[in-house]
Image: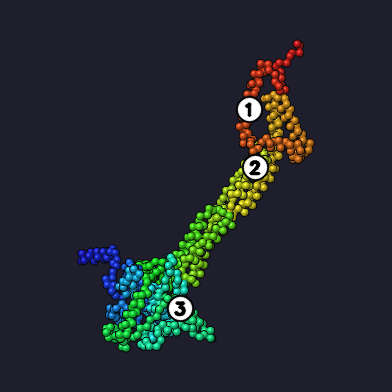
Amino acid sequence: MSKTLWWIVSFFIFVWLSPPRVFAIDDFNQAFPIVEPDPGHTKLRLSTEGLEAIRRITNPIAAVAVIGPYRSGKSFLLNQLLSLSCYEGFGVGHMRDTKTKGIWVWGTPVEMDIDGVKTSVFYLDTEGFESIGKSNVYDDRIFALATVLSSVLIYNLPETIREADISRLSFAVELAEEFYGRLGQDVAFEPAKLLWLIQRDFLQGKSVKEMVDEALQHVPNSEGDKNIAQVNQIRDSLAIMGDNSTAFSLPQPHLQRTKLCDLKDGELDQNYVKRREELKEVVKSVIRPKIVQGKSLNGNEFVSFLEKILDALNKGEIPSTGSLVEVFNKKILEKCLKLYEDNMSKVSLPISEDSLLSIHGASRSEALKSFDEQHFGRHHAKKSVEQLDEDIEKMFKNFMMANQYQSSKLCEALYTTCEDKMDQLQVLRLPSMAKFNAGFLHCNQSFEKECVGPSKSIYEQRMVKMMGKSRSLFIKEYNHRLFNWLVAFSLVMVIVGRFVIKFILIEIGAWVMFIFLETYTRMFWSAESLYYNPMWHAIVATWETLVYSPVLDLDRWAVQLGLVAVILLVYWRCHGRMKHKHGSNSLLPLYTDGSKVRDRSE
């Protein structure tokens, strides 16, 4: 018992670990569904079984689709075009349910040479219109999908053309208006060739061409009925298709229609057989490979194309040409948006707002022009243009934010540099108005030149306040610091003149300066009153000339020059003593050595 259990467990483990098997189709010489209705019979979904028959094709693909009312002989017509019996080809009548569900494809394509290109031609059978239990929206989706997928669209109509048959062409007309005439461009989408096929018992009287032309004439609408006006508009629009449509008549093959599947060609109406062969040639003459965005499609590409179209048609409550235009314009929108982004990314931020707006305008115009040259659709492209413009504006806002950030970053750095510079000028070792003004001017000029972008105005206001505050503080402290510096300098020079150099004139001059500064402030109550005295202005002018000039900045070289002065002073003192010992007389009124004064007794 345990051995049996072991085998069972081993079998389940093997099955669980084994990769899932893909059951390949062994016989493609049959019909397969590629699109089927959803459970609610309102929308469509893909059928993977039939897609495999298309994916295997590597040649360019063309599709011939037959559309028309329910039970109008579409499946039988396709079998006739493929030279197949009802038992070999598409099911007819009681051969498969009562009708075709969704869209079916014959698994083996017809190989044709079209303009020197080997082309695989698929034949598509579609679910008929106006059958019981379906919505009109579902019929519209079937019609729309067949119109977009096919290279040749056979509109199979029994006996005559009804008003409802013309109304159903509205989607085909919209496709023609949107896409027709752009063939040869990189984004070309060629609408299907429309073939009106009228099946009727008698061919006498009007030709099928006359019948079609008469059906497409305006219906009188004196009361302004909206439905009649809409159908008349479709009639007018059909003229756009021009050479893209043709008409053909086909007599009934036999009076006993229920036995058609059992009859051979010899038993059918020979006029029908003759016209059927002519129809085959007409279809062959108008078939072209399916062209999407400037290139033909192989099997995989055709399936991808089908997936996109089906998604677009299922998107809204009703299928619309606008939804298809959006699908095909999606990549073009992305490419044009990338073009705008690349142009804007070349700009070195920050720049002024006016410059950024100018570059944005030029880049936007280039992107819109590129879209206008490439886009799908003539009328419904407006929504795509609006989407592109909206995306460009969103991206421009990002560039504006980046410009704002870079501008703020740059101006903040310049502002901080100027602020530090002003702080340094406040604590000069030797206060100099000229040097402060030079630094003040340099900061203003560098900020004005280098600070750009939207943050400039804000930082300009901050700069004005900071610079004004720094200037006021410097002026306030300047006279006070200079006064104290001159008082200290005069005392130092008294000591130097008295004990170091022993130069009486220097000592006298230093005493005069010290007495003037101290007595003036005592006599006139405050040092501030001194600052308005002409003598003080002369002293300030002399000080400024000595301390700072474009050639020499004494504040920067004060220590070095002080050392040089000390060295020269020491040298001069040593050299002067040597000369004095040798009896040389100084030209300067120096203090005499007290040790050499004669004794009074002598």
> In which quadrant is the C terminus drawn?
top right
* Residue under the point 51% across and 55% down: 346
Residues packed near mark 1 inside 10 Å, few (<14), some (14 to 19) or many (20 plus): few
* Residue under the point 70% across and 16% down: 595
Query: Where's residue 323, x and y in %?
Result: 46, 71
In three-dimensional space, the C-alpha distance between marks 2 and 1, rounded to whole angstroms, equals 30 Å
Residue behind mark 2: 438
Q: Select label 1 or label 3 by which is in front.
A: 3
Q: Is residue 237 above or below residue 292?
A: below
Query: Where's residue 228, x and y in %?
Result: 49, 83
Residue behind mark 1: 566
Q: Which amino acid, mark 1?
A: Val
Q: Is residue 523 visible?
A: yes
Q: Depth check: 226 or 517 in front?
A: 226
Residue behind mark 3: 238
Query: Where's residue 321, x and y in %?
Result: 46, 73
Q: Which amino acid, mark 3?
A: Leu
Q: Depth check: 80 or 412 in front?
A: 80
Q: Is residue 383 above or below residue 517?
A: below
Farthest residue in the right direction?
523
Q: Does label 2 or label 3 sit earlier along the sequence? A: 3
Local secondary structure at mark 1: helix
Q: Is residue 485 left or right of residue 305?
A: right
Q: Is residue 49 visible?
A: no
* Residue under the point 56% across and 51% down: 409
Q: Which amino acid, mark 2?
A: Ala
Q: Is residue 534 left or right of residue 264?
A: right
Local secondary structure at mark 2: helix
Q: Select label 2 or label 3 by which is in front.
A: 3
Local secondary structure at mark 3: helix
